[in-house]
Structures are given as structure tokens and as C-alpha cells.
């Protein structure tokens, strides 16, 4: 069953439509929320709330527009709010290493894991809004125009946030390499 049919089922009150959407978008949504909140449990809670929100608001969804950006925008906004409310540190170790490719050599895995750890630590220093634009640009492959639309902000603001995030990440990673 495709997304359009699932949405129609959900609009008719059939929870089976929601199950299909959960199956299709849960992994991407949790990954997106996790990259912003830096907390696996919090990310899962954010996504669960986002699915409940679309269940309640599906009648307002314009079926002529794509569903994924509408849903992921909800996830991003909820994740930013959650990240701003919590002062938790980024979990390290197993969660990040799970993202690494399993078929690399041991040496390459160790080097990659170390680099990923350095990037992840540097990401912690970014504001939630900066993390959002980094996630949208480099993990969700969104254009600056798409990001501006999703964040309901001016394209210039998105460019500024991306530039500030990249500048901060570059400085932190240079410092890490020099040490």
C-alpha cells in the first residue's frame, strides 16, 4: 500500500493507515530527532508524539502536497523544543558506532569511529537550530530553499545558521586534529 492510500485510510479513521506510515517513516524520523536531541530515548518520545500529532491533525493535511516534509517538519520542531528543554549530554559509543558501515576493515572502522566521535562531540557545541540545519542539509540532503520553507524562516537566516555551524565545526575539528 502506498503513502497516499495510507493517508486516505487514516483520514477515514482507520488506524491501519497510521501503522503503514509508522512503518515507512519511523526510522528516518527517529534518526532525525536523535541527531537534534542527542538522546535516543528522547528522540523516540519525540517521534511518538509526532505520530500522535499527525493522527490528530491528518484532516488538515493537504493531500496535494508531499507528506514526508510535512511530517519531518513536525519531528524537527518537536526535537528542537525537546533539545532546548533538556541539558542531557550526547550518548556516545554504541549508538554512534551502529551508524558505521559493518563491512569496513578493523583499522578503517577504528579511524572512522574516532572521526565520527570527533564530529559528534563538535556537534554538541552547536545550538539546537544550528544542529537542525546541519541535519537537514547533510543528513536529509535538503536544499537551503527547502530548509527555509520547513523552518519558516528567511533563506538568509538558513545560510547564516549553516555558515555559523560549519565555521564552529571546522574550528573545533581543527583543534581536535592539532591535539
Image (tube, rainbow, N blue to C red):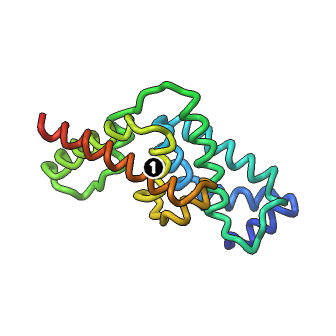
> Residue 168, located in which quarter of the rendered image?
top left
- Which residue is at the far top? 87
Quarter of the image that includes the N terminus: bottom right
Q: Secondary structure at mark 1?
A: helix
Q: Residue furthest front?
A: 156
Local crowd size for mark 1, using a 10 Å CA cut-off: few (<14), some (14–19), many (≥20): many
Q: Residue at left 45%, top 64%?
A: 141
How many numbered discs?
1
Residue 69, percent across and down? 62, 62
Report the quarter where the C terminus lies: top left
Q: Residue placed at 38% from the left, 35% from the top?
A: 124
Image height of 174 relative to 7, above or below:
above
Drawn side of residue 3 relative to residue 171, left or right: right
In the figure, residue 173 lies in which quadrant? top left
Q: Nearer the viewer, residue 163 or 114?
A: 163
In the image, what residue occupies the spot 16% across and 55% down?
105
Pointer 1: what residue?
161
On screen, residue 13 versus residue 133, left or right, reads right
Please give the name of the residue rendered at 65% of the width and 57% of the height, measured from the top-left corner: 71
Question: For residue 46, which quarter of the picture?
Answer: top right
> What x and y, as percent, mark residue 164?
38, 47
Is 131 left or right of 149, judged from the image as shown? Answer: left
Residue 177: x and y in percent read: 15, 41
Please say if 53 is above or below 38.
Answer: below
Whole-percent x, y for residue 77 in the image: 62, 46
Q: In the rendered view, does 104 fall on the left or right side of 43? A: left
Amino acid at each position: 500500500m502506498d503513502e497516499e492510500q495510507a493517508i486516505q485510510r487514516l483520514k477515514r479513521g482507520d488506524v491501519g493507515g497510521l501503522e503503514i506510515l509508522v512503518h515507512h517513516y519511523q526510522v528516518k524520523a527517529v534518526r532525525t530527532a536523535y541527531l537534534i536531541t542527542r538522546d535516543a530515548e528522547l528522540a523516540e518520545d519525540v517521534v511518538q508524539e509526532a505520530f500522535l500529532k499527525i493522527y490528530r491533525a491528518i484532516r488538515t493535511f493537504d493531500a496535494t502536497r508531499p507528506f514526508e516534509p510535512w511530517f519531518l517538519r513536525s519531528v524537527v520542531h518537536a526535537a528542537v523544543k525537546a533539545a532546548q528543554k533538556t541539558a542531557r549530554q550526547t550518548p556516545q559509543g554504541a549508538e554512534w558506532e551502529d551508524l558505521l558501515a559493518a563491512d569496513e576493515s578493523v583499522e578503517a572502522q577504528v579511524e572512522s569511529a574516532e572521526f565520527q566521535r570527533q564530529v559528534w562531540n563538535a556537534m554538541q557545541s552547536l545550538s539546537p537550530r544550528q544542529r537542525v540545519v546541519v541535519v537537514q542539509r547533510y543528513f536529509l540532503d535538503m536544499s537551503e530553499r527547502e530548509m527555509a520553507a520547513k523552518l519558516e524562516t528567511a533563506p538568509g537566516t538558513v545560510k547564516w545558521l549553516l555558515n555559523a555551524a560549519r565555521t564552529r565545526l571546522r574550528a573545533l575539528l581543527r583543534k581536535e586534529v592539532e591535539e
